[in-house]
């Protein structure tokens, strides 16, 4: 059977919601009218079996079907199928007509009777009158019949009057039914009397809590023990007005040939819900099948024993007392869900549904959880205000948490589910998000964001670049970012599941609404995104890199990246020196200990070599911790590095890398190097020479301007053995990477999360790279913080490289040290 909850996928935004919806769906599936009839009734040759009781059809001349209430039309249709041409005639009144072979179906009104109901009832009575002693009459009885059945207009009028006056009286449903039974001459066993002496099979679809079949549709085929005097006494007690009453049939002979069966009740649904919960590894607990209580009482009952890993379900009906002059648009299930809303813990989901939902809508009920509260806050919709006005239906319509089923072809009373997920998810709701202004390694203000979920926190301090690519996301001034976090982001994030990284990152995009985080700033977005990731890892008791690996869904064994260590700075990262920004060494090992030991030796040899050429005052340090020398020569830094590698003789094989950052010396269509300016083509000759002089130079970043895909492609083609790395070109942006792939412009790219603004976007770009066999090198920024997240990112994604500057600077060393921590296999 197809899914009954039509908006299941849209509502299932978290695992616990999915579980609660699966349980509710199982309940609704189990009470489907056609299904329950086919489960209860079978016909083999001439033997009709109903719940084990047999009827020989040969003994009956004719078979008639009559019925009333919500399920009647669907049930009539199914019964015709089961009886396969044996039904002689029939008439039923339900909520929607259905084409049948011999049975006439009527759409009646509910809860108040009308002319239409009267017409249908006349037809039903006509069929009933034809049934004689040797005939079998199947009577479909379902809830709505309490109002649908009236055999004269005067009864219809009296029914309407009674219903309206009784609503305000404070009397119980049982009392209402007692009076009804004595107004209608079909209720309270009246129908059984009029069918006498035919054999009657009552098929009862019970929407009455507890399944008392004499209450369903006021028991037209059941003996009624109440008397006309009792009915009169109730009318007087509640001052209901004057009614014409008749005694219900008391002669037992009218009921001797009547066989009533409860085909379905809410217990059927509750059993199915418990089974579904158990299948999902929850413990299941039935609070009661028959609760008839106010929403507040129900809330207390459900919460009383709620515990992690437990699904508590309940059946019954919520008493809603509608104050006079109320204009609220209620809905019993919505009212209960709204009453529950504020009391729900972050790991709880509550669903209240009824097979008839709110009359005349497609909604079976509503779902409540922390996400709903959060959504309401975001939209500025007041739960308390709607609750006070009994205006729950519009509340759920606005926050989008109705359980949408369309008209259901079944009828049982209200079903309630309170699901409490496992404890570890209990801590997952974001309880606080804060940010502070701190200084980066250049002394520039930046932000540090803290995301808290219960007792777990994640902190991320955002770095900043100097040679920033034009296609990077926007950066908001730190103070402004902190303010925006407090006023806009924090309210929207509270209550969110911190382990739902995709939803958090999607929300950041939603709050911003621009391509490049122009409104909330890529720095603020990333602060939240990565702090949430670290917090989620803590909630899940995982190392950050393990959680990143889980998010990345990369199946290979994580391993340490190659280190790209920048030893001589130039370009924008230095006041003087070569226009080339970085001159790196890359130890060819995944043993971080060994790599760092070798780097130390090379760095020390380099220091000696530089000392031989320059005075102490001339040698300074650049933004990324590398040396800076007062020479604009392009070749000199590479010469010293090569010499240092040789002199250090570390035993670890070494490669040389460089970030040319060519955008920094490109303008007006030319590349301006000391002494000469070059076209893109001429620049290629310069690189040819460089590679010939330094065969160890095998990893080259941004050899051309950030717009020059063609220049990159020509370079990559001319030097296929060299890693052609995009940074300013690609800016960790999957669309730009796709363009680079299309043009065969790169064989690797730099991954800087703050170029793109969220962790999800970063991982998406990395996935695209991996799919296309493009290597990824996770990178720091020139303005760094003490944060070491990029080490986890590189390790968790089994990234090819990590570029984190010279380890002599503490903010750079932090990244390498983190790698030492998470690479236990080589730890000494
Ligand atoms: P940035 O430089 O952090 O100053 O942008 C690093 C790089 O270009 O790789
Ligand atoms: Zn770069």
Image: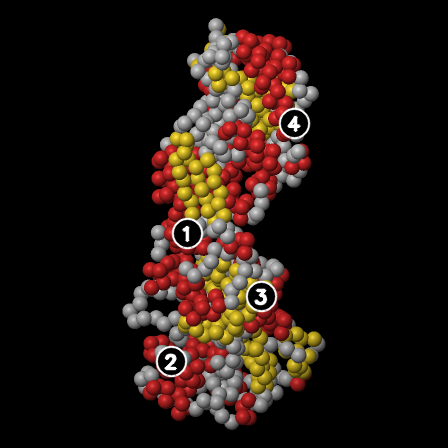
Nearest-to-viewer mark from 4 and 2: 4
Checking the image for residue 594, the label placed there is 4
Disc 2 crowd rating (10 Å Cα; few below 14, some 14-19, many 20+) is: few
Nearest-to-viewer mark from 2 and 1: 1
Q: Position of residue 166 (x, y in %)?
A: 36, 79
Q: Secondary structure at mark 1?
A: helix
Residue at the disc numbered 2: 171
Q: Secondary structure at mark 3?
A: strand
Q: Quadrant of residue 802?
A: top right
Q: Quadrant of residue 119?
A: bottom left
Indicate whether 187 appears above or below 477.
below
Disc 3 crowd rating (10 Å Cα; few below 14, some 14-19, many 20+) is: many
Question: Which of disc 3 and disc 1 is earlier in sequence?
Answer: 3
Q: Are marks 3 and 4 in contact (CB under 8 Å)?
A: no
Figure quadrant of the C terminus = top right
Q: Secondary structure at mark 2?
A: loop
Residue at the disc numbered 3: 284
Residue at the disc numbered 1: 375
The answer to whether residue 352 is visible is: yes
Question: Which of disc 2 and disc 3 is earlier in sequence?
Answer: 2
Nearest-to-viewer mark from 4 and 1: 4
Figure quadrant of the N terminus = bottom right
Nearest-to-viewer mark from 1 and 3: 3
Using the numbered discs, state the Cα–Cα distance from disc 3 to disc 4 in whole angstroms. 55 Å
Residue at 65% across / 14% down in the picture?
646
Q: In terms of depth relative to the viewer, which is nearer, 483 or 350?
A: 483
Q: In terms of depth relative to the viewer, which is nearer, 636 or 279?
A: 636
Residue at 36% across / 40% down in the picture?
484
Q: How is the image coloured?
A: secondary structure
Q: Position of residue 823 (x, y in %)?
A: 63, 35
Give the total number of marks visible in the rendering: 4
207 horizontally vs 45: left or right: left
């Amino acid at each position: 059977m197809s899914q009954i909850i039509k908006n299941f996928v849209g509502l299932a935004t978290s695992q616990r919601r999915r579980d609660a919806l699966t349980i509710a769906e199982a309940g609704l599936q189990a009470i489907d009218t056609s299904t329950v009839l086919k489960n209860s009734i079978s016909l083999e040759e001439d033997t009709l079996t109903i719940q084990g009781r047999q009827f020989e059809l040969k003994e009956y001349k004719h078979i008639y079907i009559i019925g009333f209430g919500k399920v009647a039309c669907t049930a009539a249709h199914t019964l015709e199928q089961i009886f396969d041409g044996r039904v002689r005639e029939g008439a039923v009144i339900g909520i929607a007509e259905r084409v049948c072979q011999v049975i006439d179906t009527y759409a009646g009104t509910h809860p108040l009777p009308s002319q239409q109901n009267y017409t249908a009832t006349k037809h039903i009575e006509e069929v009933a009158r034809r049934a004689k002693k040797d005939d079998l009459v199947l009577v479909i009885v379902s809830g709505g019949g309490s109002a649908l059945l009236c055999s004269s207009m005067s009864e219809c009028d009296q029914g309407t009057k009674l219903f309206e006056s009784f609503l305000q009286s404070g009397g119980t449903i049982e009392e209402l039914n007692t009076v009804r039974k004595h107004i209608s001459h079909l209720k309270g066993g009246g129908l059984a009397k009029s069918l006498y002496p035919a054999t009657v099979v009552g098929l009862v679809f019970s929407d009455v809590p507890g399944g008392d079949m004499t209450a369903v549709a006021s028991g037209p085929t059941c003996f009624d023990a109440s008397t006309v005097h009792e009915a009169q006494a109730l009318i007087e007690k509640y001052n209901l007005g004057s009614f014409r009453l008749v005694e219900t049939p008391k002669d037992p002979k009218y009921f001797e040939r009547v066989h009533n069966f409860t085909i379905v009740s809410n217990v059927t649904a509750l059993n199915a819900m418990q089974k579904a919960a158990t299948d999902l590894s929850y413990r299941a607990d039935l609070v009661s099948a028959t609760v008839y209580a106010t929403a507040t009482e129900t809330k207390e009952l459900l919460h009383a024993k709620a515990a992690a890993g437990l699904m508590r379900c309940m059946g019954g009906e919520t008493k809603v007392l509608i104050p006079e002059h109320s204009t609220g648009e209620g809905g019993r299930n919505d009212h209960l869900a709204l009453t529950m809303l504020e009391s729900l813990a972050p790991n709880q989901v509550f669903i209240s549904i009824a097979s008839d939902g709110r009359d005349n809508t497609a909604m079976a009920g509503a779902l409540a959880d922390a996400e709903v509260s959060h959504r309401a806050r975001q939209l500025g919709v007041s739960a308390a205000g709607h609750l006070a006005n009994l205006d729950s239906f519009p509340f759920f319509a606005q926050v989008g948490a109705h359980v949408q089923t369309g008209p259901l072809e079944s009828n049982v009373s209200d079903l309630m589910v309170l699901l409490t997920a496992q404890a570890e998810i209990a801590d997952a709701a974001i309880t606080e998000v804060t940010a502070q202004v701190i200084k980066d390694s250049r002394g520039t203000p930046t932000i540090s964001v803290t995301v808290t979920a219960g007792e777990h926190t994640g902190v991320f301090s955002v770095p900043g670049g100097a040679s920033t690519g034009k296609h990077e996301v926007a950066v908001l001034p730190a103070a402004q970012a902190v303010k925006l976090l407090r006023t806009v982001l924090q309210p929207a994030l509270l209550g969110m599941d911190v382990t739902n990284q995709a939803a958090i990152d999607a929300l950041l995009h939603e709050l911003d609404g621009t391509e490049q985080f122009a409104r909330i700033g890529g720095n603020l977005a990333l602060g939240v995104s990565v702090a949430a990731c670290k917090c989620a890892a803590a909630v899940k008791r995982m190392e950050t890199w393990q959680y990143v690996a889980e998010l990345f869904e990369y199946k290979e064994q994580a391993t340490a990246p190659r280190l790209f260590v920048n030893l001589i700075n130039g370009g924008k990262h230095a006041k003087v020196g070569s226009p080339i920004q970085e001159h790196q060494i890359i130890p060819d090992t995944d043993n971080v200990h060994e790599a760092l030991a070798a780097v130390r030796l090379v760095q020390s040899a380099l220091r000696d070599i530089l000392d031989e050429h320059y005075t102490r005052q001339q040698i300074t340090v650049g933004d990324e911790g590398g040396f800076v020398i007062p020479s604009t020569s392009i070749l000199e830094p590479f010469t010293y590095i090569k010499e240092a590698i040789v002199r250090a003789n570390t035993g670890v094989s070494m490669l040389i890398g460089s970030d040319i950052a060519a955008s920094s010396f490109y303008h007006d269509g030319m590349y301006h190097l000391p002494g000469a300016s070059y076209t893109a083509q001429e620049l290629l000759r310069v690189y040819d020479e460089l590679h010939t002089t330094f065969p160890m130079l095998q990893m080259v970043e941004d050899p051309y301007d950030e717009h020059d895909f063609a220049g990159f492609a020509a370079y990559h083609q001319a030097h296929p053995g060299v890693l052609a790395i995009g940074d300013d070109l690609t800016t960790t942006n999957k669309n730009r990477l796709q363009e680079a792939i299309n043009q065969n412009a790169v064989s690797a790219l730099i991954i800087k999360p703050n170029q793109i603004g969220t962790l999800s976007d970063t991982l998406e770009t990395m996935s695209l790279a991996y799919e296309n066999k493009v290597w990824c090198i996770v990178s720091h920024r020139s303005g760094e913080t003490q944060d070491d997240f990029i080490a986890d990112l590189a390790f968790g994604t089994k990234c090819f490289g990590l570029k984190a500057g010279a380890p002599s600077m503490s903010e750079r060393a932090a990244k390498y040290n983190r790698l030492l921590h998470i690479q236990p296999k080589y730890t000494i």
